[in-house]
Amino acid sequence: MPGLVAPPEAPPLRIAVPDAGEGQIRRPRSPIPRNKAPASPSPSSSSMRPKPSPGKKKMSPAAAAAATAATEESALDNPDLGPFLLKLARDTMASGEGPGKALEYAIRASRSLERCEGAELELAMSLHVTAAIYCSLGRYGEAVPVLERAVAVAEAGAKGEGEGEGEGEKKGSEHALAAFSGWMQLGDTHAMLGRLDQSIACYAKGLQIQMEALGENDPRVAETCRYLAEAHVQALQFDEAEKLCRKTLEIHREHSPPASLEEASDRRLMALILDAKGDYDGALEHLVLASMAMVSHGRDTDVAAIDVSIGNTYLSLARFDEAVFSYQKALTVLKSSRGDHHPSIAAVFVRLADLYHRTGRLRDSKSYCDNALRIYARPAPGASPDDVAGGLMEVAAIYEAIGEPDEALKLLQKALKMLDETPGQWSTVAGIEAQMGVMYYMVGRYADALGSFESAVAKLRTSGEKKSAFFGVLLNQMGLACVQLFKIDEAAELFEEARTVLEQECGSSHPDTLWVYSNLAATYDAMGRVEDAIEILEHVLKVREERLGTANPEVEDEKKRLAELLKEAGRSRNRKQKSLENLLVTNSQRVKNTRRWSGLGFKSS
């Protein structure tokens, strides 16, 4: 997470906390004085327990517990106790004693600081620490309300202090930066829960606060712009990502020397975005400039990674010889720097397998798939499960293309098992389930296909990807599975939703949208809504004639279907039920293969 202030002393806590110094928060000191004067209440449990008087009766356990609780509650009023407990929570995490005890200290610190006037900034930092500990325990849902409270406290403090001058203005700025840190941490937590829409909204609010506090061209603003751009890429929102990435490039060009590492990193992200939008020439230009920058800094491994991306772009442009050269060049460097069994080597093998499949060299394609699978079966130590699972997905897509759906299913099941319980991988898991649904559909296991599609759709709805073109295509294929199971009403609802999504994302004349129109028309016909079916087919036929010409086989098929429906519309409504198999476009090859994200990088199928 990009930050504006220094990290806390304990590395595991991943939050931004200002260091002590001029204009910063003073470090909390122990409330225990160094002289022999009577001590203030300390967090020691022994000093908080009431001592029995010799002349009184011994209290019952319940009464003793109540008295102890009352004493501890009153001790929270000590203004020095909150900062001390906060420091103790950080020290506990750093010492490895366990997050449970640290969480207890952090919660008590927050309760104490809530009672102190003028301690809004310290309270916000305490709530950040509490939320970070919840996240380290995997309790992301409990961290969300804590962070929302931290943001509210920091923003309230910023409004209260920011209107004055001098010291008040300085404190207002510190509160604003604490609010920025809270919004970014909240966005990360939503991302771990698969809520991409909420995550992006939080990042955007954090960026707005940062720009108001530091100015629009500060280098730290560039880091946050890039972070938000990567989130938009993950949500398949490429236009927004491109705008943010261009701003990042402008800031880095202003503040960094030519061909800097920061600029090279920005260009790699821009190439990724342009590639996803189909601008392969633009993507290639940025990749070449990024490679030149990395070469000037002696970053051979990064150059090899860029060579792989260049090979992918050449492959998209059907410049196969240049793609092979780029892949082989990357292989040479990666083998010498990472060894023969690193997942990055397997990833290049998969790209070569895809290339040779496209050029019809199926034996070479299968050979490279086997080489990649041998590495994925026993990857090098430290290999990321995300990289291995993503590689298995890509190999499965090749097996699907060469007509081996059973082998593809086995690989997808293995990838799903690796990532199913991993936090923050909902989108990737949904992609795997969608691809498995296609495989099940191809082999005739329609009930299994519907189950996989339903699970994938539910995850994508939760993660905020219900507005993407991929989501619309997935709804279309789920509708076809419903048709095969004779769930016609459900199929119609899914086709209608798919039409809405694809019209918004791709337009009414896009090929994917036209396939949905055809399926919806066939479903309406089967439901007896012939007039609605005719209206849709007339639009489909008009668009196909404009795009493909009147002699195209697809146009001829649409003409026959429309003529048949028009003929029936003039007859009695008491007609023989038609077989959906003759009407629906059930070619599962129309479904796009799923996409995957490694880190925050996007790879198209």
Image (spheres, grey):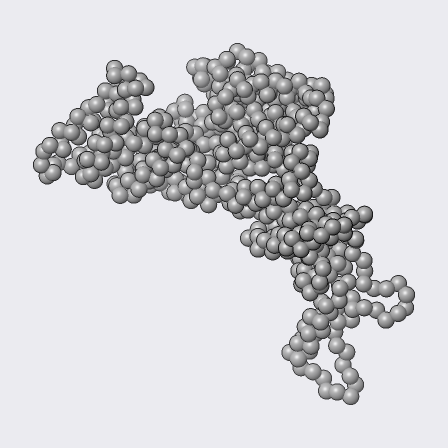
- Outermost residue, right side: 35
- Most distant residue in the top direction: 321
Residue 331 against residue 567 in the figure, above or below: above
**Which one is nearer the viewer's eye here, 370 or 494?**
494
Residue found 64% across the figure and 78% down from its top:
62
Furthest residue to the left?
572
Camera-side residue of 233 and 419: 233
User: Total label count?
Assistant: 0
Q: Is residue 327 left or right of residue 489?
A: right
Q: Is residue 184 visible in this depiction of the protein?
A: no
x then y, percent, for residue 582: 22, 29
Whether residue 360 is situated above or below residue 499 in the rendered picture = above
Q: Which residue is depicted at the point 19% across and 35% down?
A: 531
Q: Residue at x 67, y 38 (%)?
A: 215
Q: Percent position (x, y) of residue 301?
A: 67, 23
User: Can residue 529 be seen by looking at this rendering?
Assistant: yes
Q: Considering depth in this image, is 29 or 583 the residue closer to the camera?
A: 29
Q: Quadrant of the N terminus?
A: top right
- Percent across and percent down for residue 315 are 50, 17
Q: Which residue does the image show at 59% across and 21% down from the upper left? A: 286
Tell whether 412 sits left or right of 569: right
Asked if residue 425 is positioned above or below residue 560 in the image, the reply reads below
Q: Could you tell me residue 40's position as x and y percent?
A: 81, 68
In this rendering, the answer to whether 265 lies above or below 64 is above
Residue 216 or residue 503, whichever sits in front? 216
